[in-house]
Image (cartoon, helix red, strand yellow):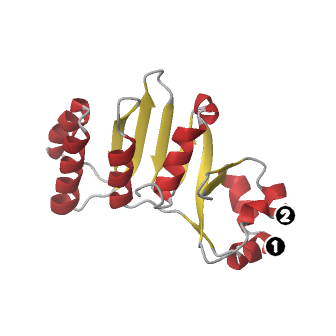
Amino acid sequence: MKFYKVLNQKKEVKNYVYKNEYFLKKFKSMIVTEKSSFAVEYVVDRYNDILSDEVMYSLFLKYNLTQVIMTNHKYMDLISIMNNKDIRVVQVLFDEDLGDEDNDFQKALRSEQTENIIVELERIMEYLEISVSKVVFRDSLENVIEILSNGVIGIDEEYLDRKNIVTKVIEVLNCEGAT
């Protein structure tokens, strides 16, 4: 599994940072969507070293880059858009134990009905005030995409050849896929 950090560049900037020579040297592997959302390969220590580089810091400021952070609502949008016959949500982890509510949520998850999953997530958010920390999708070939709350996506290497699914996830995380 390879991990990527989803970044967001504000639209008012005319040039894209992922075309910058220095940026390309630092991030050797990148996924760019048609809507110009992008994700850079993420290895924790290497990523932290890159971010502490003064030139890279100035690029983040110049190009108005932000790191995507997931919210419960982004997770629900992602599930609403991505959960279909080709790829299913198979696991949702929370930042706290659901207790007795876990049975109802697991039943909704097993139903594979997007509406049931969303209704249960809304109920959990409203009444328990618990946040989602990770969502895992799997396709019929058992390939996995996982989305973490810090905006990191884990992608089975087989998915890297299927750009349409990966780019859709990146666009949704950057709030571009819901349109």
Mark 1 lies on residue: 55
Marks 2 & 1, CB-CB < 8 Å contact: yes
Give whichever of 163, 92 is nearer the camera. Answer: 163
Q: Position of residue 95 (x, y in %)?
A: 34, 54
Q: Position of residue 68 (x, y in %)?
A: 52, 62
Give whichever of 48, 14 is nearer the camera. Answer: 14
Image quadrant where one finds the N terminus: top right
User: Residue drawn 16% across and 55% down?
Assistant: 123
The quarter of the picture where residue 55 lies is: bottom right
Image quadrant where one finds the C terminus: bottom left
User: Residue drawn 18% across and 34% down?
Assistant: 107
Q: Position of residue 125 (x, y in %)?
A: 23, 59
Mark 2 lies on residue: 22
Category of crowding for the residue at label 1, using alpha-carbon neighbours closer than 10 angstroms: few (below 14), some (14–19), many (at least 20): few
Q: Position of residue 14 (x, y in %)?
A: 70, 74
Q: Is residue 156 left or right of residue 89?
A: right
Comparing marks 2 and 1, which lies closer to the viewer?
A: 2
- The reply to whether residue 98 is in sight is no
User: Residue drawn 48% across and 21% down?
Assistant: 141
| SS at badge 1 | helix
Give whichever of 74, 34 is nearer the camera. Answer: 34
User: Residue drawn 49% across and 38% down?
Assistant: 145
